[in-house]
Amino acid sequence: MRLFSNLLNKFKMASLPLRSGYLMIGLVFLVYVFGPYLAPFDFDQIRDDGTKFQTLAPPNAAHLFGTSNLGFDVLSRTILGFQPAVAVIVISVPLGVVIGSIAGVLAAFFRGWVDRILNFLADLLFVFPALVLSMVVSLGIYAGQTGFVSGVMAAAISTAIAFIPKYFRAVRVEASQVIGSGYVQISIASGVSSWRILAQQVLPNSIRVLPILISKNAADAVLVLAGLGFLGLGITPDTGAEWGYDLSLAVGDLLVGAWWTAFFPSLALLLLVLGFSLIAEWSAEDSLRRKRESL
Amino acid sequence: MSLLRYAILRLISGALLIVASATAIFLLMRLLGNPIAIALAGRVSEEEIALRTEAAGLNRPLQVQFFEYIGKLLGGSLGQTTLSSQDVELLLWEALPASLEFGFLVLLFAAVISTPIGFYAAHNAGRLRSESLRVSAIVLYATPIFLFAVLLKIVFTVWIPLFPVAGRLSVNSQIALQTQSPNTGFIFFDALASGNWLAVADYLIHMALPVVAVGLVLSASLIRAVRVTVLEQLTSDWYLETRNKFGDNRQTATTHLFRPALATIITSFGTQAIVVLTGMVFAEKVFEIRGLGYLLTEAVLSRDYNLVQGIVVAIALIVIAINLVTDLIAAAIDPRFRKLVR
């Protein structure tokens, strides 16, 4: 209850763009949790009660978002597409955050060669675009056999790798300031072990900068998954519902005037990415403004 | 740090980064599994795979293979494609000009669009028009490039047929350019150098949609970078002091607003290089431009292990080179950028 009222309070304080971002992600969360119960059909269902679905049927009473070229129900696939999208975020973000922030704290604390080597490694990871990396990784996982798990893993790992340097740099800067502050210096002087200082004082106080990066990471993870699908490398339509792959198949439908197969998956993708982007862009500014107002 | 010292150190770190990334790619690719098995899985028998693995020397110790790979790389060779035994570097040289010219046009387009808009947004910060500009930039930024490219293609080549559907050049101009010199494969350059204005126009018309697709999304992040930098300058004591002393004239704006902003814009080009490359993979696929991204997609789809490895090495080299150049230019403009670790 306390958590809920805190969230509500935070929401009320937010500016309009930030508020819409929160709303969008809230909606995403609801559709993710209740999607499997909401979706009228399975993602690969092409018949019901023994009758085959009409292919490429426009939106109608039986299929509110119409059906696709393969005879899938577009509404069900749009709703179920939230499953891999959220899975990618849930795997990618913790992976990047943990590795990136631990490395950042270590670099700030030990400085010298540790700092230099970790910085070099961060520069190295920064060279590879997440999408290209995910294409390479998808080649390796199950020898290029694309499926639900391999598609999600390829996108999640690659995006995490691409974001490790960003978490690293942000935490490193923040941690240097924390380490320079009085209470940490006193702990060092009074002989508290380095690991204890790092774990109890530096790390918790250095990760305040992370929410913005996490929002960006989430948005990018979804984009990489959808991008893989669009190139025909991610989750294939018969192994899962994924918007990017559906979109690549829907391009041909547009030419014959069937807009619904492309429109609804795109809308879902936009909702997710735009929600996180709005939060990333405005949350920093909002907290600054509140600080100024409270002075 | 003096500019010269910075440049030398930056060059050394760039060279180290090249070696490290080549090593990382080799290790990653080997981590993924047996190249022959990946390329041919399900197409030939197990015995055939074992035989070919042996013949390709993939049973030898890893370090032997590694030094062979590095040795070849230093000689400019990236080996042969796994599937058709063509030289990888030849395929790369064929694809590279298309991508380099594409990337150049994207950067040019984005710089021209985003600089004035970023300045405008910074000058009107907090007002409705600036905020709505920001929201539209974010919407643009959040739009997947492949979605944007598909929309542009459908709208402007099918519904309103203003632009050609795919490719870089129409057949007539292709023939014209092939018989003219110079014939380097850089179509835009060739057309300009030989004074074939018809081909120049033809090329630009073909590239208009792909460039807009990638360039607008890049502009969205550049506008943010410019806006933040200019805003910082506008509220800095340094700028306010100068403005009070000398007035709000062109000279003050050039030295105290434009120059510091310029350095940031140029380094943003470096950090956005990977965004541009990602966008180009999609745009090259949608508009069938046979560049590096197109080749990469084809290579991964056909599971051609060596070709993928070669393309990723090339992409890493390009990203490192772009970052090196932009860092050096920024350091020349603004001494604050002469730091190796930022």
Image (cartoon, coloured by chain):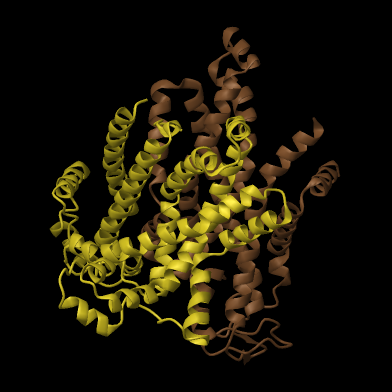
Chain colours: A brown, B yellow
Q: Nearer the viewer, residue B205 or B282?
A: B205
Q: Nearer the viewer, residue B227 or B16?
A: B227
Is residue A221 something that shows in the picture? Answer: no
Which image quadrant for residue B177?
bottom left
Q: Quadrant of the C terminus of chain A?
A: top right
- A7 lies left or right of B236: right
The percent position of residue A11, horizontal first and vertical second, equals 80, 49
Compared to B274, does A187 lie above or below?
A: above
Compared to B195, does B71 lie above or below?
A: above
Q: Nearer the viewer, residue B96 or A270?
A: B96
Which image quadrant for residue A66?
bottom right
The percent position of residue A173, horizontal first and vertical second, equals 54, 30
Q: Quadrant of the N terminus of chain A?
A: top right
Is residue B286 something that shows in the picture? Answer: yes
User: Count the marks: how many?
Assistant: 0
The percent position of residue B94, horizontal first and vertical second, equals 22, 66
The percent position of residue B175, horizontal first and vertical second, equals 20, 82
Compared to A258, does A25 lie above or below?
A: above
- A290 lies left or right of B53: right
User: Farthest top residue?
Assistant: A190
* Residue name at image x 18 percent, y 49 percent: B73
Q: Nearer the viewer, residue B145 or B268?
A: B268
- B125 lies left or right of B171: right
* Residue name at image x 27 percent, y 67 percent: B40
* Residue name at image x 62 percent, y 63 percent: A83
